[in-house]
Amino acid sequence: MERKLALPDRILLSVEKPARYTGGEVNSIMKDKEHIAVRFAMCFPDLYEIGMSHLGMQIIYSMLNSRDDIWCERVFSVWPDLFQIMKEEKIPLFALESQDPLKDFDFLGITLQYEMAYTNVLAVLDLAQIPIHACDRKEEDPLVIGGGPCAANPEPLAAFFDLFYMGEGETVYFELLDAYKANKEANGSRKDFLLKAANVEGIYVPQFYEASYNKDGTIRHFGPKEEYAGLVPDMILKQTVEDLSETYYPEAPVIPYVQATQDRAVLEVMRGCIRGCRFCQAGMLYRPCRIRSLEFLKKRARYLIENTGYEELSLTSLSTSDYPYFEELMDFLVKEFSDRKVNISLPSLRIDEFSLDVMSKVQDVRKSSLTFAPEAGTQRLRDVINKGITLEDIMNGSEMAFRGGWNKVKLYFMLGLPTETLEDIAGIADLSEQIAELYYDTVPKEERQGKIQITVSTSFFIPKPFTPFQWEPMYQPETYLEKAGYLNAAIKEKLNQRSIRYNWHDAKTSVIEGLLARGDRRVGSIIEEVYASGASFDAWTDHFDYDKWINAIEKAPYGLDFYVYRRREQNEILPWDFIDIGVTKEFMKKEFQNALQEIVTPNCKEKCSGCGASVFKGGICFESKN
Amino acid sequence: MKVRIKFTKEVSVKYLGHLDNMRFFQRCFNRAGVKMIYSEGFNPHQKMSFAMPLGLGIESRGEYLDCEIADGQNLEEVKARMNRVSGDGFHILSVRELKENATKVMAAVRFASYQILFDTAIVEDAIARSITELQSRGTYLVHKKTKKKEQDVDIIPQIIKLSYQDHKLNLTLRAGGDQNIKAETVANVLFDLMGIDYHREKITIMRLELFAEDLIPLEDFETVVK
């Protein structure tokens, strides 16, 4: 059956990379819509190349499509060139597979991977001709459901979504869609369904809840509206897959024709992280750390390569070195794929003798670089953030790597961390210089492949919900730039400054990300205002327009001073307090105290610190007790 | 063994650029389990070359690529396996072994044939008259701009064959040399002669075949016939 494209030649030939919008990729799934009970459009609100690099979307896609009565299709943001044409010609946004308008679907699922995509969320709804506010949607409009890590604080987007799914998508989607089917068969209304959905574990229906505020703008009370009290839960429990070796995994992912940013097969070896870095939201949200079995991974690796033809397989997780069967897995992969010309790429590795040995087997040493993420320049500050990497680890790892032929080092740090002093910032320059000197001490002149190349990158620390630093203030953009300037000057004073390249993130973007990350319901109107003034693709440096944000914030009752630059009281009701991620607020408070006292908390493998994630009955919480 | 693959590029894959095509074939070979010969060096890659670029939005039933595969593979089976794992619109039409020292595929191209379909809203007579008019001209100069130079090219000697019926124009043009013109250029000229503004959406273009010298289709040129 030939697919009819939503856009005519005339339009497709006038925009950049039209194949972003035509679908039909190898392994994409076509079904007969006449025999489908639930049509689900899964959206990644950014460009095709970015969204197609995302594993989570491929997992949900293959999981939902494993059912004959459900058809899950994909949709992405359209680039401004096409956006303008579609708006002018009133062409509604469509899904790639069927090319049918999103407004014909039962569900529009939007994954929220980063805050700077929020204006794109509104652009998707707007272009799809779906009312932007959930309260304006009619019976025939799709149900808009949000998920992904940013849904951990859904409140800034509460007005725009009918539902949010808290946590990992593998658990209750079928229960939710079956409830939808049953409601449709029983001729139930949209509202009937939403009430049922609100009682599916992990599902949050924002329109049934409300907040009241104190005079100072902080939340006085948050909970179900009076008429829904007792009908919907007070707390929403985050969803977690108990056994990652008994679940869905895409064995034949869709292969993009247009080159995706991550253009390779992806094997997720585990989820969560045993290390409790105090700034890291993912480290808390995905607790407990759970591994996939070696057998599961071997089988999936084979399928992936056979079904895609990719020549690269990337192992992913928050910290791949912590995978307990890493050595066995690498042995298998190297044996299995070496004669098939499949490269193995290994992000998130701790640098030690073993990982260097592995890397030298699977990568071209001369081209690849070593990556360290000390995050802070001094041991004191690394203890504050609980980053369990020491100067010794970095120096030993570097020395081994230099002997192995590497001469490119990438270092990642954050500026503006809690308790940071100028000394900590200068420490970044000192560390970089020490590594450079180590190279010249380690590698004899005649063996050197040119100069050492050190790249230092700093981002600005952004406090995120559900981390021990969730109460902390941020700095003004000018202060961030002063910090970056101070570091830049410190690096310039070093002997090997010519070997050290320094780049830093945009401070203004960081401040806006901070606003969206910890905003409450009232921030929704700011997002709407910014979108109305023409903002989109804020995650793209060239498209981000700070002035538009400032203009919108000025019209709102509470702005950056309240949401970003203010230190929150520990007893303040936070907008995300009604979500239960397993890890308790008490634990966060304790961890914050430990941070101030520079006390390191052991990782989950060494010792259980009683964070609360053991309620999920899986992963490291139970393995370590066996 | 060097082989020549003839394939189609129809429907939505007509929007893919050259690099997208290459990636598609690289992965298609892998999925089909075709044993490829890789280049030497630090960054081994499959050896693959395409005959002649096809403009974005143009379909084809006569695309070609040459590549090198390991000896001893049954070519009919290679073709069948590739078609099983191919994408919508890419269909492998033939896989043939090349004779030793065969001309490189890009250098072998001499002619290309196309079918241009005119929008049915355009009056049949007008098209027919513009074609007769073009054929009556001894020369017809068009201005051609490339990255390197600008020049006036006479399109009449570039047109080898031309036939028209029912909004369908079949064209065979010289190809491969620096004098070559696009099928779209001829369409453009016909619109000029009709006195109608040219828009790309008023026509659809399909490449039908690529030929070597003496109008031998590339699949029959210097290939081993079993």
Image (cartoon, coloured by chain):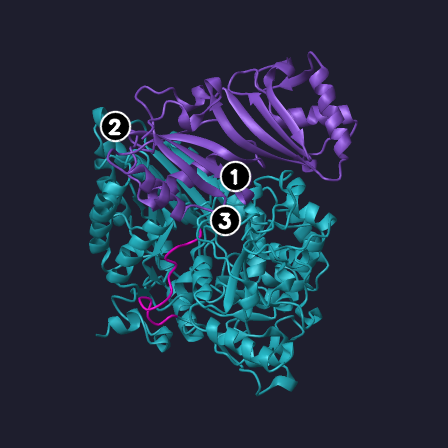
Chain colours: A cyan, B purple
Instruction: Specify the quadrant of the image occupied by residue A19.
Output: top right
Residue behind mark 2: A448
Spatial CA span between label 1 and label 3: 18 Å
Q: Is residue A282 magenta?
A: no
Please state which of residues A181 and B182 is positioned toward the viewer in this rendering. B182
The residue depicted at 21 percent of the width and 52 percent of the height is A332
Q: Which mark is residue A50?
A: 3
Residue behind mark 1: B16
In this rendering, the answer to whether B214 lies above or below A391 is above
Amino acid on which the number 2 mark rests in the picture: Arg
Q: Is residue A106 visible?
A: yes
Mark 2 nearby-residue class (10 Å; few <14, some 14–19, many ≥20): some
- Give me the chain letter of mark 2: A
**Residue A24: image location, x then y, percent:** 51, 50
Most distant residue in the bottom direction: A230
Q: Are marks 1 and 3 in contact (CB under 8 Å)?
A: no
Q: Which residues lie in the magenta part?
A: A241-254
- Give me the chain letter of mark 3: A
The kind of secondary structure the magenta stretch mainly shows is: loop
The residue depicted at 38 percent of the width and 70 percent of the height is A241
Most distant residue in the right direction: B195
